[in-house]
Image (spheres, helix red, strand yellow):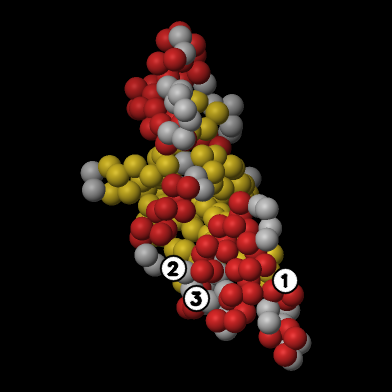
Amino acid sequence: MYIPQIFEETDPHKLMSIISRYSFATLITNSTSGLEANHIPLFVNRSNDRDVLQGHLSKANPLWQSVPDRSEVLVVFQGPNAYISPNYYPSKKEHGKVVPTWNYVAVHVKGTITYIHDEQWNKAMINNLTNQHEQAQATPWSIADAPDEYIQKMLSAIVGIEIEMSSIVGKWKVSQNQSVDNKSGVIAGLSCINHSDAQSMAELVKEQV
């Protein structure tokens, strides 16, 4: 990923917060059949003082057979993004030298993938993944709410994956290269849009003022 220094984010807490909040990831792999992208939810698990990403695939997905165990993979987490209109910039009225752009946050993780066929490991992984996403529910669902036989049947239909992280980079393109007045214009413009990404991006730009 091309990252100009002004947009580079190295704070591990910010990087991990994007992985946690925007956990529906794009898993990019390369095999004899070429490049492939799969879209799956992942979560970070700290195991033996190392950060790993964990999740699962359907056993019907040929990925676990076409991409060898311990292969290098790329995982992309996409945070909030928003179109930035030149109309947001006060400098448009001053000199007109403005163009549209796109603000966004992205985190890229490289690592090695391992496939897990142990049902107890996969059950624990599903528990962790479910707990992460059910916590906002008034009555969180858990595996214990479903019949044991049904859960066993579901577990037999998946393959667990674990990705040992070897590198992590983040790009926060949130109007850092604009003047204070233009940043304020971006915040005002995005705040008028009734969309969660626009609202989230407005908050990120506020941090730069």
Compare residues 81 and 23 and report the one nearer the observer.
81
Where is residue 59 drawn, in percent x and y?
54, 26
Which residue is under mark 1?
A: 85
Q: CA distance from mark 1 to mark 2?
A: 24 Å
Evaluate if marks 3 and 1 touch, with contact meaning CB atoms under 8 Å apart: no
Where is residue 160 drawn, in percent x and y?
44, 32
> Which residue is pictured at 44% across the width and 47% down the height?
20
Where is residue 201 drawn, in percent x and y?
57, 62
- Which one is earlier in the sequence, the residue at label 1 or at label 2? 2
Dot in front, 2 or 3: 3
**Other residues around mark 3 within 10 Å, as few (<14) / some (14–19) / many (≥20):** some
Amino acid at the residue labelled 3: Val
Asked which quadrant contains residue 188, the reply is: bottom right
Evaluate if marks 1 and 2 touch, with contact meaning CB atoms under 8 Å apart: no
Amino acid at the residue labelled 2: Glu
> Which residue is pictured at 52% across the width and 32% down the height?
57
Q: Is residue 29 above or below residue 186?
A: above
Compare residues 61 and 151 and report the one nearer the observer.
151
Q: CA distance from mark 2 to mark 3?
A: 17 Å
Helix, strand or loop at label 2? It is: strand
Helix, strand or loop at label 3? It is: loop
Q: CA distance from mark 3 to mark 1?
A: 18 Å
Which residue is under mark 2?
A: 9
**Other residues around mark 1 within 10 Å, as few (<14) / some (14–19) / many (≥20):** some
Helix, strand or loop at label 1? It is: loop
Which residue is under mark 3?
A: 209
Q: How many marks?
A: 3
> Which residue is pictured at 38% across the width and 44% down the height?
44
